[in-house]
Amino acid sequence: MKQEESSLQRCCVAWFRLQYPKLATLLFAVPNGGSRNAIEAARMKGEGVTAGVADLLLLVPGNSFHGLAIEMKAGRNKQTEKQIAWQQAVEAQGYRYIVCRSFDEFRQAIKNHLTK
């Protein structure tokens, strides 16, 4: 994950945990990115790391969805083909998937998701 996306994600997670302390542990990052040596990469792939999985998962149902998958993007960065395929797969299972490019988008998406 690029530095700008990482900073945005850290800000969003910190806000969420302050605003929703009872749900804090149900929003978590998926460690799919980053550079690894071949041995560690193979081990993690065997453990289930899957290319394309969203950066954050919120395992709280809301607004007719089972949960929320959040892909963080900065600037003009676009989803990869694997991210788009994963998005389609989870949406077909009743999950909401969003791409967030700002804190305001994240905050509004969370509020929309948790509003019943």
Image (cartoon, helix red, strand yellow):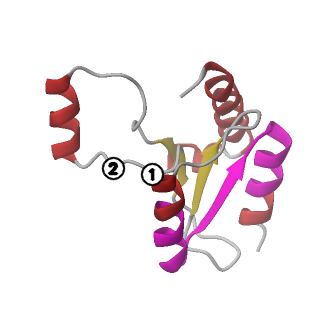
Camera sees residue 22:
no
x, y percent for residue 101 = 76, 41
Disc ID at residue 50: 2
Evaluate if marks 2 and 1 touch, with contact meaning CB atoms under 8 Å apart: yes
Q: Could you give the CA–CA distance between mark 2 and mark 1, rounded to whole angstroms?
A: 6 Å
In-front residue for pair 100/35? 35
Question: What's under tag 1, amino acid-wise?
Answer: Val
What is the quadrant of residue 104 in the picture? top right
Instruction: Give the secondary structure at mark 2.
Output: loop
Residue at screen point 15% across, 35% down:
43
x, y percent for residue 9 = 64, 33
Question: What's under tag 2, amino acid-wise?
Answer: Thr
Judged left or right of residue 89, residue 45 is: left
Check the image and report above or below for 16 versus 68.
above
Residue at screen point 74% across, 55% down:
110
Check the image and report above or below for 88 versus 21.
below
Magenta-colored stretch includes residue 114: no
Q: Which residues are magenta?
A: 86-110
Residue at screen point 61% across, 26% down:
6
Instruction: Give the secondary structure at mark 1.
Output: loop
Q: Report crowding for label 2: few under 14, some 14 to 19, many 20 or more residues within 10 A (C-alpha).
A: some
x, y percent for residue 78 = 65, 45
Which residue is denoted by mark 1 in the rendering?
53
Residue at screen point 72% across, 64% down:
113
Camera sees residue 26:
yes
Question: How many labels sit on residues?
Answer: 2
x, y percent for residue 97 = 62, 62
Judged left or right of residue 19, residue 61 is: left
Q: Main secondary structure of the magenta part?
A: helix
Check the image and report above or below for 110 versus 20.
below
Q: Report crowding for label 1: few under 14, some 14 to 19, many 20 or more residues within 10 A (C-alpha).
A: many
